[in-house]
Image (cartoon, grey):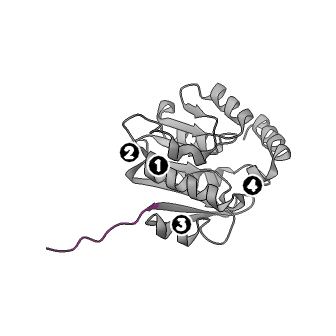
Amino acid sequence: MLLNDTLSFWRAWLRAPRSIGALAPSGPSLARLMTSHVTHLDGPVIELGPGTGVFTRALLARGLPTHRLALIEADPIFAEALTRRYPDARVLSMDAAQLGQTRSLFGDERASAVVSGLPLLSMPAAQVAAIIQGVFERQLHVDGVFYQFTYGPRCPLPRQLLERLDLQATRIGSALFNLPPAAVYRIGRRQREQVAA
């Protein structure tokens, strides 16, 4: 990780600790786990709360072309730095809860995956619901997947929200060497069992 990124992270944390939700930037083991199931062949990718770009770098290292990436960052300082660093990416300085009122970020094409670095456990329930509903209703392909990490013991999305939106969450692994250790969840639309005719 770049020293400048670490300093930027700490400055942002001092400005608004609740909006950062961590005591240190995500480490390489968590970045690898968060992006390990994302392939550039499936379609464009949206990253929520990229911050200093730890997951962004991991996505690009996996072969995702920069122009197939949309970065949604509420912190204007982070957003400006990301725009300079990744001029071919779509960088939007906005609250991810507005994605439900935003047309598809890739025109007629929907994203194949969303990689979220948002601190969902420290956000109001209404904001979390708006983010998840907006992503699944307006941005993700029908088979698209939402990846979220958490420092908590279970999925950070409330069961009632998952049920209401007909979603299912699966834990795909843990990054024990991250500081602090984190678990990663894959959230997608519930698969319907086909009934034999």
Magenta highlight: main SS: loop
Residue drawn at the location 74% of the way across and 61% of the way down: 180
State the image quarter where residue 90 is shown. top right
Q: Quadrant of the C terminus?
A: bottom left
Foreground mark, 3 or 1? 3
Which element is circle 4 on? loop
Q: Amino acid at mark 2?
A: Asp
Residue 82 in the image: x percent, y percent?
A: 65, 32
Name the residue nearer the viewer: 107 or 30: 107
Residue drawn at the location 64% of the way across and 62% of the way down: 125
Q: Which label is found at residue 161?
A: 3
Q: Amino acid at mark 1?
A: Ala
Q: Which residue is mark 1?
A: 113
Q: Amino acid at mark 3?
A: Leu
| Residue placed furthest toward the left | 197
Crowdedness near tag 4: few (<14), some (14–19) or many (≥20) residues, C-alpha within 10 Å: some
Q: Earlier in the sequence, mark 1 or mark 4?
A: 4
| Residue placed furthest toward the right | 14
Which element is circle 3 on? helix
Is residue 12 covered in magenta? no
Vertical comparison of 195 with 17: above or below: below
Q: Which residue is mark 4?
A: 21
Crowdedness near tag 2: few (<14), some (14–19) or many (≥20) residues, C-alpha within 10 Å: some
Q: Which residue is mark 2?
A: 42
Q: Earlier in the sequence, mark 2 or mark 1?
A: 2
Residue 194 in the image: x percent, y percent?
A: 24, 70
Which element is circle 2 on? loop
Residue 17 in the image: x percent, y percent?
A: 81, 51
Marks 1 and 4, how far apart at CA: 22 Å
Is residue 192 covered in magenta? yes
Q: Which residues are magenta?
A: 188-197
Marks 3 and 1, how far apart at CA: 19 Å
